[in-house]
Image (tube, grey):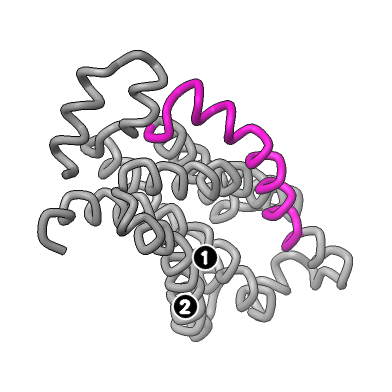
């Protein structure tokens, strides 16, 4: 990594946003087959299952429409941090769901944050990276998504042996952990130098570039 260590660190931390996306789309697939989940939600049919699964994507769609304006107005860094807060809210609603409506709302809320992060994270990564490693750094987002799916599958598998509603509540609740980690870590990450320049904060942009280069 050499002189680009700081850049890889910042890009790697922000890629946790991709991990959240992968985890949330992966965790629900196994939960749908858990006996305690089916019993708690009264064995939803194909339509009910389809709504539960698809509402995350619907939230992503809405979030992505707003992402550009949010990232430009408040910065890529703050957009990611705000998304973490919204994601925690969505994950908490899913974990504590008392009925199908709560679960659907939680999925949609989490999707809103994922939609914003799916745009903000790659933009943030590309704007902090020098040209010769830009593609490699941005690819961390996709790599993190696949890791999120993998981790979700294994956590679902382990929790499948729990003989209570905790078998599906724990996997849904665990996703709060990386979201909190990302939020805290982003506090210490720099603003995008491109965003700083666009907002006439030239001196700050120079300091960030000196740190990353």
Regarding mark 2 in the picture, which secondary structure is present there? helix
Q: Residue at x 58, y 33 (%)?
A: 68
Point out the stretch of residues depicted in magenta.
52-77
Residue 33, placed above or below residue 40: below
Give the residue pinned by disc 1: 22
154 with respect to 181 (left or right): right
Q: Residue furthest front?
A: 132
The magenta stretch spans residue 148:
no
Q: Residue furthest left?
A: 2
Main SS of the magenta segment? helix
Give the residue pinned by disc 2: 150
Q: Residue at x 57, y 71 (%)?
A: 26
Front residue of this view, candidates 149 and 131: 131
Dot 1 alpha-carbon crowd within 10 angstroms: few under 14, some 14 to 19, many 20 or more: many
Name the disc covering residue 74, or none.
Answer: none
Task: Work out how far the residue at label 1 is from the one at label 2, CA to CA, in angstroms.
Answer: 8 Å
Q: Are marks 1 and 2 in contact (CB under 8 Å)?
A: yes
Residue 70, placed above or below residue 98: above
Residue 8, placed above or below residue 85: below
Q: Residue at x 67, y 54 (%)?
A: 56
């Amino acid at each position: 990594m050499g002189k680009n260590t700081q850049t890889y660190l910042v890009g790697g931390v922000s890629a946790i946003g991709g991990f959240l996306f992968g985890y949330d789309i992966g965790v629900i697939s196994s939960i749908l087959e858990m006996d305690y989940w089916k019993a708690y939600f009264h064995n939803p049919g194909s339509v009910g299952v389809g709504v539960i699964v698809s509402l995350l994507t619907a939230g992503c769609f809405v979030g992505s429409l707003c992402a550009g304006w949010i990232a430009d107005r408040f910065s890529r860094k703050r957009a990611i941090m705000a998304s973490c807060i919204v994601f925690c809210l969505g994950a908490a609603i899913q974990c504590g769901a008392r009925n199908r409506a709560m679960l659907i709302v939680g999925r949609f809320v989490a999707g809103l944050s994922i939609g914003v992060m799916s745009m903000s994270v790659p933009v943030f990564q590309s704007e902090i990276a020098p040209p010769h490693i830009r593609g490699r750094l941005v690819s961390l987002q996709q790599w993190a998504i696949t890791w999120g799916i993998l981790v979700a599958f294994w956590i679902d598998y382990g929790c499948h042996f729990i003989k209570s509603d905790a078998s599906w509540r724990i996997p849904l609740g665990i996703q709060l952990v990386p979201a909190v980690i990302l939020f805290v870590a982003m506090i210490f990450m720099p603003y995008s130098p491109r965003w700083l320049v666009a907002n006439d904060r030239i001196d700050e942009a120079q300091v960030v570039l000196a740190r990353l280069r």
